[in-house]
Each structure stands twice: as structure tokens, then as C-alpha cells.
Image (spheres, helix red, strand yellow):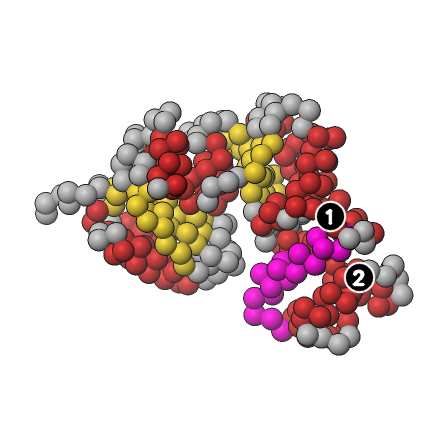
Amino acid sequence: MARPERSLYIGIDGGGSKTCCVVGDASGQVIHAGYGGATNVKSSSRAETEDVLLHLLEDTLARCGASMGNVRGLSLCLAGGHRPSDKAAMKQFMVPYFSPETRIDVQSDATAAWAAGTWGQPGIVLIAGTGSIAYGRLSPEGREERAGGWGYLLGDEGSGFELSRKALQAVLRHYDGRGPATVMTEAVLARLGLNQPEELIDWLYGHPAMRRELAALSDIVMDAAGNGDHVGETIVADAVGELTEQVRAVRKRLGDDNLPVITAGGLFSAPYFYSTFQSAWRQHVGKTGECRLLTLPPAVGAYYLALHGAGLASPTTGKTIENSLRE
């Protein structure tokens, strides 16, 4: 079979709520981005994840006037995909759909955010969205270290899920007479269309997407804290404390207290949360090393990793990708 003239490289960032697919050429020019549903390999079934990925790949490539045969590099960065068994299973599924020449790499979604924030240079990405994790490495081939990211039952400290769970606990503690009043009671009930706190039980345990829907209430905590609600302030302070500890742990494991930190995820887009984190960072962690927000979609980091894996990344590739996004 003749080799297709057009060689494309793809980066995919898959999470618990949505998935982004970026297609570009060998020079770092982004051609198109497509979006699909959730592809968390732990919270979605394998069949659901595979179906979303296949449809997203086919649709995004079709919009570029291309097909799977044009793809020379694919970097799949999926939530829950850092374990060797998950990587092997996903790669095995993908291989039959591509040319034998296609290089397929499977990593966690944190790797995509790290690459988008560092372009392969030493650093740590701290993600606080529905879940949370600190992930760092010194190069694309270097040793990787992480703290957190153990899921909502065992970890995810400082995440949107934890903030919202603590908010509901505070509402119920006050309802029982075991805790102080909080403006979050009225805000939560109004958001969910409930009349009494006891109705939270049916809403929470009867919801098919409980984890995602609960995490979506985190903005109520931000609003309460920003307006001086003591309970909300305490919840946010505890969260940023957990996140700074994650960073401290990864820096220690990598043996470099000067590693820059890039923050990513929905919680950091809330001004109150980000300013509170910055204060805690300067006080407890950030006496050395920079801390900044991730300003690019993580999927472009996955695309960069696809280029790097093919030996096509250079010191200017990151800037080329950034410039192509502005065009």
C-alpha cells in the first residue's frame, strides 16, 4: 500500500467530563481540534472509552480531510491511564486502526498538562479540577513522580469533589445542630431545587453522575468563602493546604526544590481560590521556583509529546504550536 502523502500527529487529552483531540502536522502547526465525551479509564467502562475515542478520532480527522492512515504519531493522555496495565490495554485496542508505522503512546492526562506547561522542560503540574494530582518530571524520557490522584474514594484532596463534599457535610452538620451556620445551605438547596437538607440524600445517591455533579457545586464554596463565610473559608484553606503538600512531595521526590509549578484545572480559574493558593504557596512552598497558570489546553501538550516521540520536537516546537493557535 502506498504511503499517504500527508503525515499527521495527534494528541488527545481525555478526562472525566470531556476529551479533546488536537491534530497537527510534523512542523508543529495545529490543524484542527475536536471534542468528545468522557474517557476516564477508571470511571467509564472500557467499551465506552474506546467508543468515544474512535468516534472522536474519525470525526476530527475527517474534518481535516484525512483518515487514520495519515497518522504517524498518536499520544493518548487519559485520566486514570498511568498504570502499565491500562496503558497496554489501550494501546492494544488502538493498534489495529492505524498503520504499522504509527507510533502510539499512552500516558495519564497529567502528562499532557505537564507538557503543555513546560514543553518538555523540568517542572511540576498541579491539577485541581474534579480530582487533583501533582505530577512532575525532568524531561519527556525522565523519571516521573506524582502525589495525589488516587481517586475520590482514596484521595483527590483539594479537588472540586472534595470541596463540594465538605460543603454538603457542613450543611448537614448545621442541620443536625453539630456545626455552625453557613450561607452555603441556602445556596446549595437553591441550586439543586431542594427544600430541606435531608433531601440531599436522594439527590446525591440517586444521581447517575454523582461525582461530576457534586464537584460542579464547588463554585458555591468559592462564593461563600469570597464573601466572608467562615465555613467556606476553612474548606478552601484546607484544600490549598493539601495541594501545597502535594507539590512539596513531588519536589522532594525529584530532588529539586526549585522546580517551577504550573497550575491547571477548573478550581484555579476561580479568582478567590487562585489568590488563596498563591498566598499559601508563597508562605509555605514557593520561596524558590516560579508558579504560574497553565494558559494552553492540555491536548496541545499531548500533541507535542506525539511530535517528541517521533523525534520531531525541537527547542522551538512549543513556540510554533503556540503561534499556530493564535492564527
Which mark is on residue 236? 1
Q: Secondary structure at mark 1?
A: helix
Q: Amino acid at mark 1?
A: Val
**Which of the marked residues, 1 or 2, is nearer the chain's N terminus?**
2
Residue 135 visible, this angle: no
Residue 207 lies, with reference to residue 122, above or below; the image says below
Which of the 4 image quarters holds residue 311? top left
Magenta: predominant secondary structure element?
helix
**In this rendering, position of residue 235 left or right of residue 213:** right
Q: Secondary structure at mark 2?
A: loop
Depth check: give the residue in front, 271 or 84: 271
**Which x, y percent locates residue 307?**
32, 35
Residue at image position (79%, 48%) is 234
Total numbered badges shown on the rendered structure: 2
> Foreground mark, 1 or 2?
2
Say which mark, if any, is on residue 183: 2
- Residue 269 colored magenta? no
Left or right of 148 in this view: 170: right
Q: Which residues are magenta?
A: 206-225
Q: Residue furthest left?
A: 2
Badge 2 amino acid: Val
Q: Position of residue 113 (x, y in %)?
A: 49, 41
Q: Residue at x 49, y 53 (%)?
A: 15
Residue appearing at x 25%, y 56% in the figure: 62
Residue 243 point in image, percent of width and height? 66, 40
Q: Is residue 219 magenta?
A: yes
**Neighbourhood count class around disc 1 (C-alpha, 10 Å): few under 14, some 14–19, many 20 upward:** many
- Residue 175 quadrant: bottom right
Q: CA distance from mark 1 to mark 2?
A: 15 Å
